[in-house]
Image (cartoon, rainbow, N blue to C red):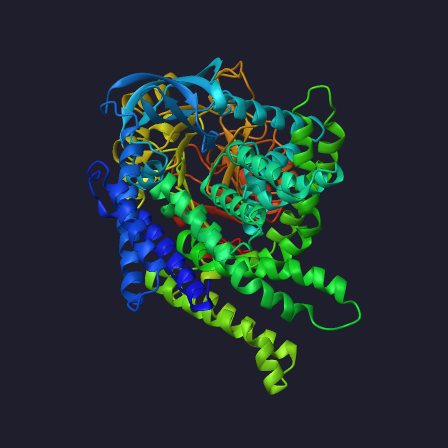
Amino acid sequence: MSAPGQRRARRLRTLTLVGLVGGLAAAPLTGLDPPPRHAAALGAVALAAVLAAAARRHRHEAVLLTGAAVCAVATGLALGAARTAAIDGQAYRAPEGRTVEARGFVAAVPRRSNGDVRVLLQTKDGRVLAVASEPVAQLAPGEEAVATGPVREPQPWERAHLAREGVARVIEARGIIPTGARRGGLSGAIDGLRRRAEEALGRGAAAPEAALLRGFVLGQDDLIDAVTVEEFQRSGLAHLLAVSGQNVLLLALLASALLGLAGVPLRARLVCVLALIAVYVPMAGAGPSIQRAGIMGAAGLAAALASRPASRWHAMGLAAALTLALNPRAAGDVGWQLSFAAVAGIALWAAPLRAALAGPGPRRRARAALAEGAALTLAATVATAPLMAAHFERLSLAALPANLVALPAVAPVMWLGMLAAAVGQVPALPAEPISGLAGLFAAFIAQAASWLSAPGWAQVELASPGIPGLIAIYGVLLLGARVLAAGGRARRALGVRRSAVALAGASLLVGGLAAASAIPREPDPSRSPGLQVSVLDVGQGDAILLRPARGAPVLVDAGPPGAGVADLLVDRGVDELAAVVITHDQVDHSGGLAEVLARIRVGMVAHGVPAGRLTRTADAYGARLAVLETGDSLASGPLRLDVLWPPPGMPSSHGAADPNASSVVMVARWRHFDLLLTGDGEAEAVPLDPGGVDAVKLAHHGSEDAGLDGLIERATPGLAVASVGAGNPFGHPARGTLATLAEHEVPLLRTDAHGEITIDVTARGWTASGGVGSRP
């Protein structure tokens, strides 16, 4: 084909792919009814006719190219509407409010948070989400389970996500019980491969490292503790916990090298790697990002088999078209967007950044290796940063150093993990030495995440730029790409040093990031509270509201009857609570629960020892109940509440007539701030060693407590707060308590003297209302 013909073919291919992707992505947004039968086929025939005409010489090339684009969009719309209708038609559709028993196979890794378990079930009547309170047994994809409970429609905040999963109903399950059965067929065979891989990864490594290996290799992060997940997010290493294109690339390299050592010819090697990718993608969950990576990898291998150069942009377009053909709503998935943004950024900027960073010098090889890792990380980080700001309103500044520190361990941990997973498929072969070594690399990466998530600058809060802002930012970034690409020509023409060109290009690149935070939500975002603790003034009772910047608020105790806790929450704009924790069932702590449940949407009511009145109140309002005991945790966003007391099986009276001894005691943790919440659990009756804390809520409104001195010695708090009623007849806070605090020089804020107490926790420290207890 002549050069003009090749250019015309490239333009035709590009326009066709762009039109098809656009039509597929737009189909769910148009609200089109399912198209007439064979409409997609007719559109494809029309597209083929236009392509055939365009392949011939014709003077009106622009007309033909426009026609091809229009036909491609129409075909995409028809296919997208048909596929969307097919997905919606497979959803479970029981009437809202009906109590059902749904039996089906687990379709994805269950998600556990805030004491809830969310399980996606594929039943004979369609796909449905079952939500139940802990405890729920460990469930793996492919296991059969039964969920019983009332049916509801998805809440507005979860509707779009569940629609992408093909879910139209949610079961508020009283329990999710595994039956012991597993699905069969090809899906069952893939489940068996995944199950044996999980076992192999867990046999030779300690539990924390084994959980990380499951995340690195299989994308299953459900067993990783919340603190570690938060550290990976803050340090910019969270992408390692989700299977992506990096996994597919490393798998292809590992398999190709091993097959080469075994003497397998090149073309046979490529076919084997292609088959391996086809197995690995569904085994790793077949999410949008891994689908994209698998399709792009397969396209590259197919091009190699055909002895043709692979086009990166064509492979991206093909991956977008195929993933959207599987699920047109995938374009709304954050992972799908970030995946394509990262690949596009690497394609645009990695090479010029690598050349700019490597520089000349005698140690060029070592410098080039470092420049390669830095260029890939910087290109992907810059390309995804505007989307991160738009979706999550935060950005990790530690991403570049963290990825560079972790870089030497990433390929080894992936390769060793994949080898262990492969060896684990044969029961007679020991995988422990391999997974044990992989666990050491995983521990190194986790330590890097911990180190680089700790500084206050590791993550910054940004305002969402909105769609116009995103367009402007990416326009600036594309301009930066052009400057970087032209760096070599500019340097030769003007005699400019390489470092100057790199600086100019990098300045334009980061200019887009600056635009993302051009409209701050507050005058100084770095000082805005990441957590706000409000000790509400409810008289002689307890009610403490914890509001993380990312996550629903948590209420600890609901105050006495008539204290107006529900009104206080509504006045603060709180219409949803992740949980209400009732430390113990006495009226000064639980009396306002009914008012809260009547006016506020509550995820669950959590309590400690058996409490009949509390249970009846929760049941009356249809609230889910969860029982807390030592070792349990609740989480909402980055806020975590670790339960220190009561121990398992403790009766409400603890062998005595004092229910205070069975009060739930927790430590609320947000990053490096710890608040000890004692309920009414006085230290003389509740053996506690919480470690160092920043602040403590005095037990039982500051009553006389013989164990307080020892607790203050162990915990060394910088502030004490007391929820106490003015002129109460009990003499709270007691003189002995005040004397103990004064002896240890711990300042005290009390609701009877100061009203509501507020503790604002930021990346730079924390302050309490009135300035007392400030820790810069």
**Residue 375 in picture, x, y percent from top left:** 61, 62
Is residue 518 shown to the viewer in this render? no
Residue situated in front as seen by the camera: 383 or 592? 383
Splitting the image into 4 quarters, where does residue 257 fall?
A: top right
234 over 81 or under it: above or below: below
Residue at 31% across / 61% down in the picture? 65
259 over 140 or under it: above or below: below
**Residue 703 in picture, x, y percent from top left:** 50, 33
Residue situated in front as seen by the camera: 396 or 342? 342
**Residue 435 in picture, x, y percent from top left:** 71, 32
**Residue 571 in picture, x, y percent from top left:** 28, 47
Task: Name the side, left or right, on which 534 lies relative to 345.
Answer: left
Task: Name the side, left or right, on which 708 lies relative to 427.
Answer: left
Residue at 63% across / 65% down in the picture? 354
Residue situated in front as seen by the camera: 62 or 197? 62
Task: Name the side, left or right, on which 235 lies relative to 331.
Answer: right
Splitting the image into 4 quarters, where does residue 727 fall?
A: top left
Is residue 636 shown to the viewer in this render? yes
Total numbered labels: 0
Task: Name the side, left or right, on which 283 lies relative to 692.
Answer: left
